[in-house]
Image (spheres, helix red, strand yellow):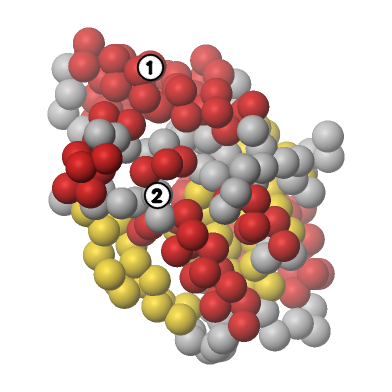
Amino acid sequence: MTNITATALVCEIEARASGRDRILVGIAGPPGSGKSTLATDLAARLGASAAVLPMDGFHLDNERLRQMGLLHRKGAPETFDAAGFVRLLGNVRSEGAVSFPTFDREADRTIPDAGHIDKETRIVLVEGNYLLLNIPPWSDLSDLFDLTVRLDVSTEELESRLITRWRDHGLSPAEARARALENDMKNVNFVTENSLSPDFFLQTGE
């Protein structure tokens, strides 16, 4: 295991981006590990040449999930348009400007073409739960990243964060605990058991 701090990661990304038109950095980790926070922080440190691209815009819509009998498992790997996400990252690598869908958590829906990668963007920080999964089509992502980092957070801390997240969304303590344990923590365990090794691990709090 190769550990890294956020400060050292900025230096590593800048070094790998030197002389390149564009690089893709995969920021992976289980639900609640702090991927979005890290990606935003890195983008701020790296400056105008960097942009964040979240995986969450590829959630399948709720009606589709109802038809599939998977609404109760929203957030699991099978509830995303993984093939569409792989295609998008292929386009990001080969094209200049690219638009992508984002996810509105309050409205619980995706918003088509709400996110944009400009042709001047040299560093694309891709963040998501399943970037390192070793099962198709997710496993096709491994050839698209120039650098990968996985957030390392204890199971106990993840459980606490996920319960708090659902409490902040208005659920009762019992509802929040059930939502976290019966869905989110299943996804945490799946990520832990079925992920490829990253280039670096970043421990929570670093």
Q: Residue at x 33, y 31 (%)?
A: 73
Q: In this view, does 161 lie above or below 143?
A: above
Place of residue 83 in the rendered image (x, y in percent of width and height, measured from the top left)? 49, 59
Image quadrant holding the N terminus, namely: top right
SS class, disc 1: helix
Q: Is residue 154 left or right of residue 168?
A: right
Give the amino acid at mark 1. Answer: Leu
The CA span between labels 1 and 2 is: 20 Å
Q: Which residue is drawn at 42% across and 41% down?
A: 78
Binning the other alpha carbons within 10 Å of mark 2 as few (below 14), some (14 to 19) or many (20 upward) gives many
Q: Which residue is drawn at 81% across and 69% down?
A: 15
Give the amino acid at mark 2. Answer: Phe
Query: On the image, numbered disc 1 is attached to which residue?
Result: 181
> 97 or 59, which is in the foreground?
59
Place of residue 135 in the rendered image (x, y in percent of width and height, measured from the top left)? 62, 43
Query: On the image, numbered disc 2 is attached to which residue?
Result: 80
SS class, disc 2: loop
Place of residue 95 in the rendered image (x, y in percent of width and height, measured from the top left)? 56, 86
Front label number (1 vs 2): 2
Image quadrant holding the C terminus, namely: top right
Place of residue 62 in the rendered image (x, y in percent of width and height, measured from the top left)? 20, 46
Q: In which quarter of the image is residue 161?
A: top left
Find the residue positioned furthest to the top.
174
